[in-house]
Image: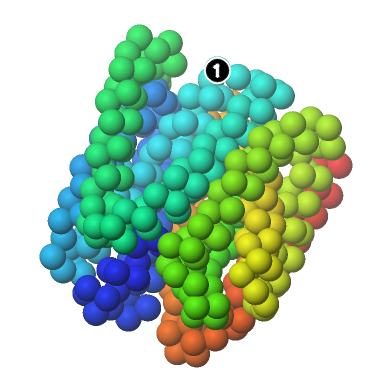
Amino acid sequence: YAVVQEPIISEFKLSLTDSGLLVSVFFLMYSLMQIPGGYLADKWGGERTIALFTTFTALAAIGLSFVSSFWLALVLRIAIGFGNGPLLPAAVRALTKRLQGHQLEVANGFFGAGWGVAQILVLNLLPAVTVMSSWRTSLLAIGVTTLGVSVYAWIASRGSTSNQVLPVGKPAMRLRETITRRMVLLILINVTGIVIPLTALTWAPIQFVKLFRVTAVDAARVVSIFGVLAIISSMVGGFATKIIGGRRVMIASMAATLGGVLLLTNPVSPTIGLLIVGVLGFASMFYISANFSMVPGSAPAGSTNPGFVFGVYNTISNAVSFFPPLISAYILDTTQNFALLYLSVSVVAVIGLVSSLLFRKSSL
């Protein structure tokens, strides 16, 4: 959405707060579907759950490319959040049931790198398609591509040994067994990893256009460095976890994320902005492998129902992440001050850093 928000704002005559709402409702529904998605993944199998909800997401994305009003766009953004919500718990369930120990950490690193690949493709291709055609064509292309992925997911899910239907405990009982102190600290670290990149990727392109008079395509290419560094970071983080330990990896990630968002208050030039976004790209994904690998083990229920446990973890992470996009959009809407925007979200990065330090202490 971030790379096509300007033409959408223009066509529907939206305020920045309206645009922020389109971001936030996605995360609200995404977060609400985490626990049900994890429960279904434990019951049906990760691959089958991925196939079903990827199909739903694709159809909603295709529908979004044909909307004629803000309210219809809002409904379809909610629908896309509904379809996306179960995917991550289902993927974690599938990986956890197949891999253990360092193999799981490395696999999570490569899994996180896939996000970086997607960001590179989206941030480079969609602005160009939007300029040559329209934002509707860009979103239609995303929907059709996702539909193709869903077809592959259905094929891959056939005959999978991890798709056995399993008995799962009552959700209320599992929920009580899941929310531990270690889980809360991991959640706060993850909130930082969601909020800071989301803020940077949503507003940095507009910031660069306004400050440096670059084109929207150029701004998107500058931000695409985030994806490049995210790919490298996620894979490096998987291997670094074995060398220096996952707790130190998370501390380093949170410290660099805080530094990056503070530097973004005054990027000085497009080149400096590029470097800062690169720092954020690396820092904000470095923690993924260590953090995700520790989630099932942070709660007693994780050994039998990793999908459900991860669903709880991601539900709370994304529910908290619902508010910063709205707050940051309101701050920017009323002050037109990017420095104040980034200073406000840096509070989240401080919380993430403190949480990583507390997690290391609690684990020693």
Residue appearing at x 53%, y 73% in the figure:
208
Rendered position, 261 above or below 234: below
Q: How is the image coloured?
A: rainbow
Give, as a three-letter code, the residue at label 1: Arg
- Where does residue 1 sit, x and y in percent of width and height? 36, 59
Rendered position, 209 above or below 223: below
In the image, 360 versus 228, the foreground residue is 228
Residue appearing at x 34%, y 71% in the figure:
6
Q: Looking at the rendering, which quadrant does residue 127 occupy? A: bottom left
Residue appearing at x 24%, y 63% in the figure:
74
In the image, 5 versus 238, the foreground residue is 5
- Where does residue 120 sit, x and y in percent of width and height? 50, 47
Q: Is residue 233 visible?
A: yes
Q: How many marks?
A: 1
Name the quarter where the C terminus is drawn: top right
The residue at which mark 1 appears reads as: 98
Q: Secondary structure at mark 1?
A: helix
